[in-house]
Image (spheres, helix red, strand yellow):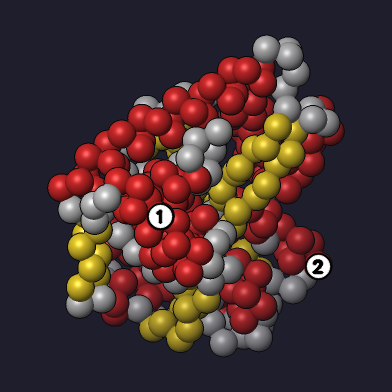
Amino acid sequence: MADRRLQVFHAVAKQLSFTKAAEVLFMTQPAVTFQIKQLEEHFNTRLFDRGHGKISLTPAGDMVLEYAERILGLSSELDVRLGEMTGQIGGPLLVGASTTIAEFMLPRILGEFKSQYPQVKPRLIVANSETIETRVAEHTLDIGLIESPSHQSNLQCEVCCDDELLAICSPGSPLARLKEATPQQLAEMPFISREQGSGTREVTDNYFRAAGIAPDSLNLVIELGSPEAIKGVVETGIGFAIVSRASVAKEQRLGDLVAVPLKPRLNRTLSMVYPKEKFRSRLVNTFVEFAKSKLKQLAAKQG
């Protein structure tokens, strides 16, 4: 119901980039630029200063942003409250999830939720934890599931469950003969890592730092952007990786990979994030409780 121009302006103002705003909104950059131009013509003032490849808000832009956040929040709340007067739980549900959660935990949860609430139309956006946090903060996702602590003060963070990380290697690797692996032992071996911005990468880096090992000193042979890609490379025998226990269960059963517990053990929390100030619909609240319950059940089975 809110003016589309305000929605586009809000995204550009938060991202301070027409290109990034277009990605978040699933629009083309020229379309974003056109909407901003229309809004500036409507107010008869510049909302952004443009120069040297960067943009910034003008004083007028700061004022519009303040009101846009309030207007968009109220518009969303109005839509939801009117929809809930029917008594049914339904409508679009925009869920973002970091890669490990999206690939190995969430599909079954979303399927079961859709089966229980047929009127719901879920949409899953997959990215690393940092990107998911940003999109939730921009109000382009209803809720996000991430693998690392939240870094944004304007987001509410709820811990869902614990997740153990293990070292994985090919069956022929010397690491496969160990019952446990210490950080010092791993530091001497070729390492296959997730990319910067990944929750798994952040947790792993902190684990080595706590053991007195600088992440930059590791024998890093390759960085990859997904757990599936990581496992495929590890199977070739060129190095080890550290991944979620949930992501490697099938390969362990088939004998393609060996999982070795870490010493000390490495556990992290999986969390849900959503804007602190945003009204949460009954649909979102219902999904939050449903997903938290299912994730805890999954963690209990793996434990």
Considering depth in this image, is 215 or 55 the residue closer to the camera? 55
Whole-percent x, y for residue 170 in the image: 65, 78
Residue name at image x 30 percent, y 46 percent: 43
Quarter of the picture holding the N terminus: top right
Q: Earlier in the sequence, mark 2 or mark 1?
A: 1
Q: Mark 2 packing: few (<14 Cα in 10 Å), some, or many (20+)?
A: few
Left/right placement of residue 48 relative to residue 6 reads: left
> In the rendered picture of this protein, how many numbered marks are placed on residues?
2
Whole-percent x, y for residue 106 in the image: 67, 46
Residue 110 seen? yes
Q: Which mark is residue 254?
A: 2
Q: Which residue is mark 1?
A: 38
- Amino acid at circle 2: Leu
Residue name at image x 68 percent, y 12 percent: 85
Residue name at image x 76 percent, y 44 percent: 108
Residue 180 seen? no
Above or below, 242 against 159 in this view is: below
Q: Mark 1 packing: few (<14 Cα in 10 Å), some, or many (20+)?
A: few
Determine whether the residue tagged by mark 1 lies in a helix, strand or loop.
helix
Left/right placement of residue 162 relative to residue 54 reads: right
- Amino acid at circle 1: Gln
Q: Nearer the viewer, mark 2 or mark 1?
A: 1
Quadrant housing residue 118: top right
Whole-percent x, y for residue 117 in the image: 79, 28
Residue name at image x 69 percent, y 71 percent: 257
Distance CA(mark 2)–CA(mark 1) = 58 Å
Name the residue furthest left. 59
Considering depth in this image, is 287 or 235 the residue closer to the camera? 287
Considering depth in this image, is 195 or 115 the residue closer to the camera? 115
Quarter of the picture holding the C terminus: top right
Determine whether the residue tagged by mark 2 lies in a helix, strand or loop.
helix
Left/right placement of residue 174 relative to residue 21 reads: right
